[in-house]
Amino acid sequence: MKSTSAGGVSGYTESYPVDGIPENSGRFVVRGGARLAGDVVLAGAKNSALKLMAASLLTPEPCVISRVPRITDVFTMVEVLRSLGVAVDFEGDELRIAAGDGLSDCAPYELVRTMRASIVVMGPMVARLGRATIAMPGGCNIGPRRIDFHLRGLEKLGARVEIEHGFIKLSCDRLRGAVVPLDYPSVGATENLLMAATAAEGETVIENAAREPEIVDLAEYLSSMGACIEGAGTSSVHVQGGRPLHGTQHQVIADRIEAGTYLIAGAVGAGDVTVHGLEPHHLELFLTKLHLMGVEIQEGKHSMRASRSGPLRPVDISTLPHPGFPTDLQAQVMVLLSLADGTSIVTENVFENRFVVVDELNRLGAGITTSGHHAVVTGPRALTGTVVEAPDLRGGAALVIAGLVAEGSTEIRGAHHIDRGYEGFADKLTALGANVTRVQADETPLARTTGASARTLR
């Protein structure tokens, strides 16, 4: 089986097969009760790095991207690019990508089905080649994420779209600029259209565009390649297309979701954690909500410190596209809310299945009830360690955070979900003082740490 070394992720080496899922999924074991304190240097943003990698398809010249996180999703995208005939070297946190002149027009099913982000190769492929064949995407099971926004937008630019036998086929004689209004500020659709528009003749205007910091990072990357883009980070993005693009060098912005995850991890145990590398305005509403809960926040130019010494207060949270509260931090903050003195209501407005982790959190004693896209979190709750299953990337991180304050030991299975988005998760938590161990799938860690029998774990 073809594999890529993930050297150093979570303190061990593991092979990633071409479908993007680790051959040995592994588990996290957390011993609760430790107070977290210290500093975390953030990795590059997963949700930016993957799109910059796709944008590198727009030029045959080499592109160098630094501060790239060594996570499963990045290794999967490396394999996607290689399957298209692209030369990719990944050393340390630096990627060197050279698409050359022999670019394939078909992204393989085996890779695309495992990671939804790979759908963003569609825009640059049709821009560069005038055609593309992409398998329908997969990824986390957090509810339908419609791709019709992508397809309708590309059709506005002149692409012909056919869907048959689970594949999307696009073709065009020439892309032409147009006004493309999005029904919803979809991040993926904005990214695909932004990349395709760089090759379209004339001006493209993306209305109701996504405003996430990762969109700005992509626009800056494309601009450094020679594109002319205005308005990135606002709801109206203008692209003057048709300019030749060249190779470039660029550093990925820091991961705001990783930042929020570690700040919450510190706050649950009344700790004191500082994250470095991110501009605080990328998490402005999130930091406001932490402050309202009783967490002390200190902001630097590229750092954020969260500390807590008193009780937590309940707050209501509604997830929304940026600059709203990030859906990718909803599961983690529910753990914090379960410790607050009172009732909080969490409303999920982005992905309908984001509450899939609730059953597992309740196994730890969280006491969360759901109705439709609302969750009622009543605290304070005393969490107790047990065996739980990570249902997805952010839900898995939430379960590890819950384990930090649960009595006894918590085993989180399905660690491959967490590996998709967090570089060295166990190592960084351990450096803050947590008792977190990453173990292989065939071990029985709770039996080793608590005296439980292997039969109990089954």
Image (spheres, rainbow, N blue to C red):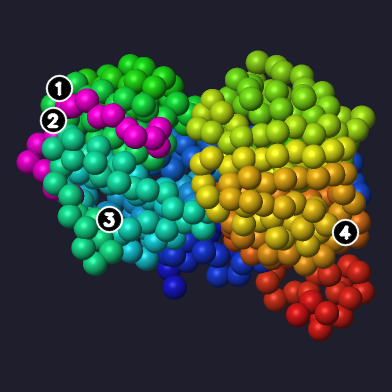
The residue positioned 85% from the left and 61% from the top of the image is 385
- Residue beneath disc 3: 134
Mark closer to the chain start, 2 or 4: 2
Q: Tell me, yes or no, whether the two marked residues, 2 and 3, touch with CB atoms within 8 Å.
A: no
The quarter holding residue 80 reads bottom left
Q: Amino acid at mark 2?
A: Arg
Percent x, y for residue 38? 82, 33
Work out whether residue 56 or residue 389 is closer to the camera in this orientation and state it.
389
Mark closer to the chain start, 3 or 4: 3
Percent x, y for residue 254? 57, 31
Q: Amino acid at mark 4?
A: Thr
Work out whether residue 195 or residue 38 is closer to the camera in this orientation and state it.
195
* Looking at the image, residue 260 lies above or below residue 304: below
Side of 125 where 371 appears, left or right: right
Circle 3: element type: strand
Work out whether residue 362 or residue 155 is closer to the camera in this orientation and state it.
362
- Residue beneath disc 2: 176
Work out whether residue 381 or residue 42 is closer to the camera in this orientation and state it.
381
Spatial separation of the CA atoms under disc 4 and disc 1: 60 Å
Spatial separation of the CA atoms under disc 3 and disc 4: 45 Å
Spatial separation of the CA atoms under disc 3 and disc 1: 26 Å
Crowding near pointer 3: few (<14 within 10 Å), some, many (20+)?
A: many
Side of 362 where 450 appears, left or right: right
Crowding near pointer 1: few (<14 within 10 Å), some, many (20+)?
A: some
Looking at the magenta stretch, what is its main secondary structure?
A: loop
